Amino acid sequence: MGDSAGSELEHRVAPHVRRLRSRALRDRLAESLLFIPGLMLAASVALAMVLGHIDAHHVGLLSEWVTFTPDVAVTLLGIIAGAMITTAGVVFSLLVVSLQLASGQFSPRVLRGFWRDRPGQVLVGLLLSTFAFCVLALARVDTSATVAPTLTVGCALLLTLASVLAIVVYLDRISRQQYVGRIMERVARETTSLIAELPYGPRIGVKVGEPVEPPDVAALGPGLAVPAVHDGWVQQLSRRALVAAAPPGSVVRLDTRVGAYLVAGTPMVTIWPAPADPATSARLVCDAVIVGVARTMQQDIDFGLRQLSDIGLRALSAAVNDPTTAIEVILRMASVLRPLMLAETPARAVRDGQGRTLLTPHELGHADYVEHAFHQLRTYAAPHPSVVVPLVRSMRMLRTACTDPARGPLTPDRAATVAALDQQLALTVAAVRRAGPLPEELAAIEAIAAG
């Protein structure tokens, strides 16, 4: 009986876990500098074999367009192979330098955008593929023949031309990618795409059930606490899989959230009452939470705000001292926060059709996003009135959007958001006062904060 119940739980959880793992795999492959180059390298080897076979059985094919003596072909292929492997080393060096500059100038958390650059991955793959193709082609050249394999040599020339064009494109992209505005635009675009899925979407998570009042878990008695198995950041989780891992009528509390750091052995999920097969439920719960070594943008809206904030903090540091970049960060932050403040977030207590209740008390709300976006920026921006002014104006803009009468009566969630914005405004003005600006500057900032 217990085996059949466990099989039923696994059957319910499996589709959601497969989606999580496939999405996690796609994200890792998108950031890999080995996947696409490896595929292209394998394709070049296969192409060299196929073209070598065709040349061997159709001597002189296309010779009216491409004709080389064997000696010339050997020299040409050798030069191309040497040039490609040398250029590949130069490209890797440029990539490393770009990563160092981006990490030191902006933030280590923006490096993932450089890893995910598809043209750069294709260029590396093209250089390695051309090198491998030419080396294999050298083995196919018969120096005693009258002409070299025409298809093979012609393809080598085409690959060389494509590599040269790809290098030009890559140099253009790598110079533009270092511009801070493009980095911030990419981060803001990724974050906004996640916000557009709220409250439910293919990445954020499908709807589990209808909102309900959270039960008093203290009155539920002992439950099953499922600890984290690995240390790391919560990159993804499936609410449906978590609920499906518990028997009907259970209460499931998620004791973490996407973007939080888990310490192995600490509670991750608690289920009331304890399931009849606790080992199976615990294993399925762990499958429903993807933990990794770093935060990602798979489901983590807050990570987008973190990246923008880090760029602003680095710009305000004494080592960089770039208030203009800090101002642009604030403006980008406002562009991200406005749709976020107007979006509906998932309820923190929902119940599905089989009476299972999911509690997510640690899920971020609008007030949390406001604090995470402005808490550190306002602290370090206080000595810079030119940075404080757009910061305060952005807060006022968000407050106006939340209190817009066209959106209907002020809900408790929006009231909490307005209170959080008011608190950030008050703390910002207080920090500016402590920084000791000119009276005229302080008066202007206070006027803007007062609306």
Image (tube, rainbow, N blue to C red):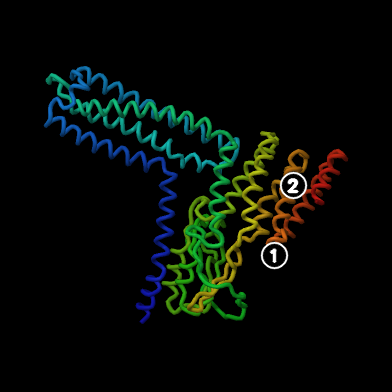
Is the residue 155 above or below the residue 42 in the image?
A: above
Query: In the figure, is residue 328 to the left or right of 61?
Result: right
Is the residue 213 above or below the residue 181 in the image?
A: below
> What amino acid is at disc 1?
Gly
> What amino acid is at disc 2?
Arg
Secondary structure, mark 1, is loop
For mark 2, what is the residue?
Answer: 393
Is the residue 398 above or below the residue 185 in the image?
A: below
CA distance separating discs 2 and 1: 24 Å
Q: Residue 128: where, in percent of width, then height?
A: 33, 33
Q: Nearer the viewer, residue 145 or 97?
A: 145
Query: In the figure, is residue 75 to the left or right of 448?
Result: left
For the N terminus, the image quarter is bottom left
Identify the residue at the far right of this view.
439
For mark 1, what is the residue?
Answer: 408
Is the residue 350 above or below the residue 330 in the image?
A: below
